[in-house]
Image (spheres, grey):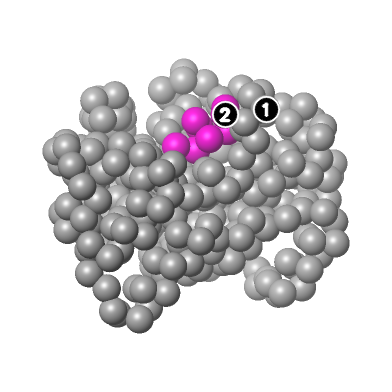
Amino acid sequence: MQIDEKKALEELVSRGIKIPPQPSVLVELNQLLMSGDYDARVLARVIAKDPGITSMLFKAACSPVFGSGRHFKSLDKVLMVIGIQETFNLVRAMALTSSISDNTRKAFEVFWTRSQEVAQLAALIAADRVSVCNIFPDQAYLAGIFHECGVPLLMQRFPDYCETMNLRSTCCGPELAEEDARFNVDHSVVGYLVARHWKLPGFVCGAIRYHHELPPDEVGAVTTLLAILQLAIHFYHQLLRTKDPSWAWLSEPVMAELGLSFENDQDYFELIAERFHSS
């Protein structure tokens, strides 16, 4: 489905749903990367302007997924070892959690915990399957953090959204049909518009738009990233020992896209779960 982005954004604004602007750190980083006039030290100085993002970045960068478990003492070393584009993607993911938040509401803490853990699982799957799928851990992590970012925006707009959509539990995500019926809005479209506004890669935006399905007309990187994201969500349910209602019809195309076998699916879950708990 094609979306008229300008019209959709105008409609959201008219309904009181605000798309958060990119933090100044992201704007400045993007300008430097576009100009080509930078080095690791220049980029590190820009990132360091935001202590919150810097702290989260160090934590992620020291994980086995991105930094092979090594500990970094400086931001420029993070950039040199992990890679500039990879670090930029991590910064974008970290920036989102501080841009859409409400420290007075427990529901936001629950939501971001879920998003970060799904993102971590997606990054682990991408790291393991990169030679087959050509999706990198930072890209999968970015999609994981952003995939339901429309939800906290709707929490802010509609005071009864959490209660109505039963989002008090860490395992629950909103049902699109009920969401549309109650609020006449689709968090997947809202998340897609946020991703486009923040200038995320096109295939990441596509995965955010369709993260509840695996549309047959989508091909290439979008489909592969969707499969990684959906397997990460399924593994998240398994970690919590809760039912994943979508897996019955998503499992076959997801596993096929990632080159995985149903016969070894439990072994694969245990492998990823072990890495998740050690990271």
The boundaries of the magenta stretch are 109-116
Q: Nearer the viewer, residue 63 or 271?
A: 63
Q: Is residue 5 visible in this depiction of the protein?
A: yes
Q: Is residue 93 visible in this depiction of the protein?
A: no
Q: Is residue 70 left or right of residue 118?
A: left
Q: Quadrant of the N terminus?
A: bottom right
Q: CA distance from mark 2 to mark 1?
A: 7 Å
- Relative image position of residue 40 (x, y in whole percent): 22, 63
Count of all numbered marks drawn on residues in the image:
2
Q: Which circle marks residue 49 in the picture?
A: none
Q: Amino acid at mark 2?
A: Glu
Q: Nearer the viewer, residue 144 or 247?
A: 144
Q: Please name the residue shown 48% across and 67% down the image.
A: 27
Magenta stretch holds residue 235? no
Q: Quadrant of the C terminus?
A: top left
CB under 8 Å between discs 2 and 1: yes
Identify the residue under disc 1: 105
- Relative image position of residue 150 (x, y in whole percent): 64, 49
- Relative image position of residue 156 (x, y in whole percent): 74, 41
Query: Secondary structure of the magenta portion, mostly?
Result: helix
Q: Which circle marks residue 109 in the picture?
A: 2
- Relative image position of residue 197 (x, y in whole percent): 59, 66
